[in-house]
Amino acid sequence: MNKAHFSAICLCLMTLTSTCSLARSFDYQLKPIKVAQDTYVFIGKTEDFTFENGGNIVNTGFIVTSEGVVVIDTGPSLRYGQQMKEAIASITVTPINRVYLTHHHPDHFLGNQAFEGAPIYALDTTFTNIKNEGAGFADNLYVMVGDWMRGTEATPATEVAKPGRISIGDHQLDIMSYSGHSSGDMTILDRTTGVLFSGDLVFNKRTLTTPHADIKKWLSTMGELNKLPFKVVVPGHGPFSTDKKILGEMTDYLAWLENTIEGAVNNGLSMTEAIKLPIPKRFSSNAQLQQEYSRSVIHLYSFYENKVFKRVN
Amino acid sequence: MKNKIILLLACLLLTPPSFAENLAKDPLNSVQWDDMYEAFLKGRPAKFDHRVKVIAPNYAEDPMNVPVTVDASELGDVTQIVIFADFNPIPLIARYYPQRAKPTVSFRFKIQQSSPVRAAVLTNDGVWHVGGVWVNSAGGGCTAASTGRLVGDWSDYLGEVYGKRWSKSDSNRVRFLIHHPMDTGLVAGIPAFYIEKLEFKNTDGEELAVIELFEPVNENPVLSFDFKAKNLSANILMSGTDNNGNKFKAEFVK
């Protein structure tokens, strides 16, 4: 190949590359939505991870207190965290006071790097879970959303959050430790505004996910959440709501899921047969219903099999 | 070594033209299809047949445990069902011989990357009927060490069988889990170690079915069968061996 040819090819490649990067600016289009006094959220799509959405399928938020900004979850990637920080700066010049991570799933903490320097709080279980599974989660997200993840590394929390009431400037926050969606689910109830950040203990108009779920514990946690005096709930996924009935809808689906899977195992069905079972119409307004039900069967089936199978040798 | 290569080349050159040339276009568009035919189905005609149902989720949520059901109940007399995944480093997953059993079987397997998962069903007229689906995967199921290896406690449970039997009007459904690491041999330092064969009879001496398992079947396999013995109330006996000579037995009572 002569030099002229080589340069021509290089030029073509460069043009191609720059066109690609123009088409992909990796902008999550994060818009802070005010849900109460001092309180803003970023609402993600009710989709699964794709190359198109870059993992923006999650809700994150922040509270502007007189002693700095409290950030709740950091999103699925370094870029998300950085863009979140920019969006926060468009609302307030107050520095970041601290970050809370609701739990250890990748869409909730992989933006941590962007908040380096601020203390990042997580429950002790979440602390351990990120240490054990964080790197694997990040690898998996690279596969699922591609270059949106560039530069992202699983960065652990820096402080253990103790459950209890805490005053940060003019806001009083109840940090609560539950489980069910995962082994460590933090919720934050802002006593000053009545906003409940539920993490993934609540999904709204989006079918819940169960990769680390314990349905019995989750159901009992829902009972606890129901007693909380909140005015607005910001779920982990799906639109925020002022209506307590979204908790009831969660409980309804969780109970149905447990009965259905336990029933299928008791009736001798295989996993694939259980996946084919009909889903009641009342759940059909929740995004990703069939897909998440199928995933839940795969996550939960062996737990119930182990209860039904008896030693035969 | 050199002789072996020459022998291999000679075999390849001398291989008579196969039925693969006359095969209908693979509905799953896999470049591996011809090789799969050569490897597992050679010598008999094969056709794609929608009556062979391979049911699996389109995404491998857990690449170490992909559930699959093969159902060939709409075909006539079935003598053998071969189940394989084109792009697995070890494609062959299981061979099922339903003697007095419905031509349907369910289990879980490990998938290494996105791949067609197929069942070829041999009917007594000597024709392979082939069905299949694509299963997408982020990958890694075959080259990750089993949990039992990672925890190191697999030998404490080896060969323990947990299961249950359900009596139906025309058959007995039997589902069970058998503790075994099912090592593929593709993880450094861990040789292939897997259950090779499980045979099912009943206490009346009726032979019900035989299944041969291969490396890709999941750790602590969970299998489902539907047996159609003449005497549906007789106890069902399972016996099996792995490639290290360990023997397994279980009994499923009414």
Image: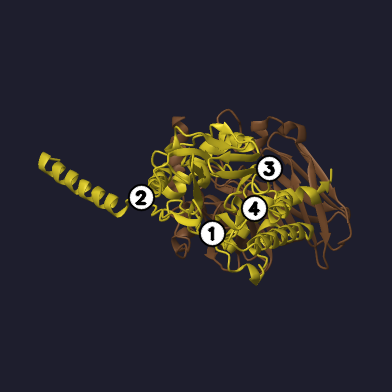
User: Which quarter shows the C terminus of chain A?
Assistant: top right
The secondary element bearing badge 2 is classed as: loop
Q: Position of residue A304 (x, y in %)?
A: 75, 51
Q: Nearer the viewer, mark 2 or mark 3?
A: 2
Q: Which chain is drawn using yellow?
A: A
Sequence-first tag of 4 and 1: 1
Q: Could you say which disc has been placed on residue B196 in the image?
A: 3
Pointer 1: residues within 10 angstroms few (<14), some, or many (20+)?
many
Q: CA distance from mark 2 to mark 4?
A: 33 Å
Q: CA distance from mark 4 to mark 1?
A: 23 Å
- Badge 2 and badge 3 in a common chain: no
Q: Nearer the viewer, mark 2 or mark 4?
A: 2
Q: Disc 1 marks which residue?
A: A238
Give the amino acid at mark 4.
Answer: Ile
Q: Chain of mark 1?
A: A
User: Which quarter shows the N terminus of chain A?
Assistant: top left
What color was chain B assigned in the picture? brown
Q: Chain of mark 3?
A: B
Describe the colour scheme in one phrase.
by chain
Q: CA distance from mark 2 to mark 3?
A: 50 Å
Give the amino acid at mark 3.
Answer: Glu
Sequence-first tag of 2 and 4: 2
Q: Disc 2 marks which residue?
A: A26
Q: Disc 4 marks which residue?
A: A298
Say if A306 sits above or below B232 in the image. Answer: above
Give the amino acid at mark 2.
Answer: Phe
